[in-house]
Image: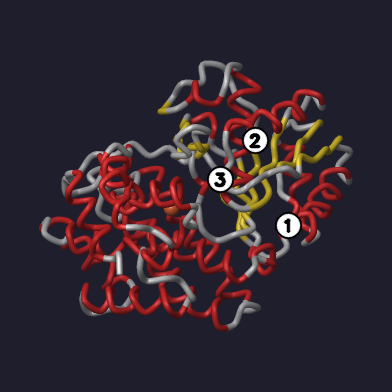
Amino acid sequence: MLPFDYQPRTRLIYGAGTLSRVGQLARELGGSRVLVVTDLGIVAAGHAARALDALRSEGIVATMFDGVRENPDASDVERCVAVARSGDVDLFVGLGGGSAMDTAKGANFVLTNGGEIADYKGIGKALRPMLPLIAIPTTAGTGSECQSFALISDPVSHLKMACGDPKAAAKVALLDPELTLSQPPRVTVCTGIDALVHALETAVTKKRGALSQLFSREAFRLCIHALPRVLSVPGDLAARGQMLLGAAYAGIAIENSMLGCTHAAANPLTARYGVAHGQAVGLLALGVLRRNFQNAAAADEYLALARHAGMDSVDELQTHFAALLPLAGLQVSLSKLGVIRESLPEMAAEAAKQWTASFNPVEYSVSDFESLYQEVLE
Ligand SMILES: [Fe+2]
């Protein structure tokens, strides 16, 4: 068994309607001037107003930054920092999908430690204390609420910079499944597939351990069964709750196990072609699984994952997963996403440079990445 070092940094609160507790929780953490970091969709859904009301009912001065954009970059972080600075805030609330939580974390780095977000690329670059963060996901996908990483796009290459520090982890993750009912169908699909791929990837990385595997397996079991249900019956609160919890567990698995070549290969697709992250990882996941399966230990882990989810074999797991993409309305080829053959070598070179590739159980050369793309081109 591999050694591990597990320090839970985030208090997890799960339950329908728990958004109403955000004011009391902010108070407990010493917050008196709170910035809610969110996007206009969450404002339109009414969640932001409920969060602000809950904060103000505790006598907290609550302000809002509603300018979060998808795949936030350094300029998004700077805009959020300016609002936080003018409000002299002492606590952040990240309310929304991964982009909202990442923007809040990114702003927290720069506000408390100075410089610019690129200074924090890597792990443990923040030398001064950071403000407490309450993370409230409204999608079931990234697991950012359970991680100490802010994923911010490099404005030039558009590739994601992972800025991680134990101090950046949320003090509280508030998991309220009612908030996920308002997700547009496309968001439910893309984030749900992403959560499932997080479970698959974390299960086999070189950094996996007895602890991370608990979370990978349970995340996979919850999401593989609940995802078809939330696609067919979007109002099923129990299934929404399973997805939300599964995504959070997968986030804990990432924090302890990192990711692998599916994410390495997906990032250039998003950076170059704007392919949605969930679509990209969903399309590439089984190709990576088949290569990883050549590693005996990884093969054992995939089988354990399948069995924990009530399946007899890894073949059954693959069949189940493969059926999800068309069911979810996702494309099953790169060409349908506008990707041309000529760009594969350059994308493969970028994929091979991704940090997450280094944790994959099987080594990938540039030509391995190229053939991975090639397999799903048409
Ligand atoms: Fe992901």
Q: Position of residue 302 (x, y in %)?
A: 23, 64
In the image, is 290 to the left or to the right of 159? Answer: left
In the image, is 286 to the left or to the right of 327? Answer: left
Which disc is residue 76 wearing? 2
- Mark 3, Cα crowd under 10 Å, few <14 / some 14-19 / many 20+, is many
Q: Position of residue 52 (x, y in %)?
A: 83, 47
Q: Relative to 327, say whether 28 is above or below.
A: above
Which disc is residue 41 wearing? 1
* First reached walking from the N terminus: tag 2 or tag 1: 1
- Which of the 4 quarters of the picture holds residue 104? top right
Q: Which residue is mark 3?
A: 71
| Amino acid on which disc 2 is placed | Asp
- Mark 2, Cα crowd under 10 Å, few <14 / some 14-19 / many 20+, is many
Circle 2 sits in a helix, a strand or a loop, which is it? helix
| Amino acid on which disc 1 is placed | Gly
Circle 3 sits in a helix, a strand or a loop, which is it? loop
Query: What's the distance in space between the residues labelled 2 and 1, CA to CA?
Result: 17 Å
Query: Nearest the camera: 37 or 243?
Result: 37
Residue at position x 47%, y 29% in the image: 165
Q: Position of residue 341 (x, y in %)?
A: 29, 57
- Mark 1, Cα crowd under 10 Å, few <14 / some 14-19 / many 20+, is some
- Count of numbered circles in the view: 3
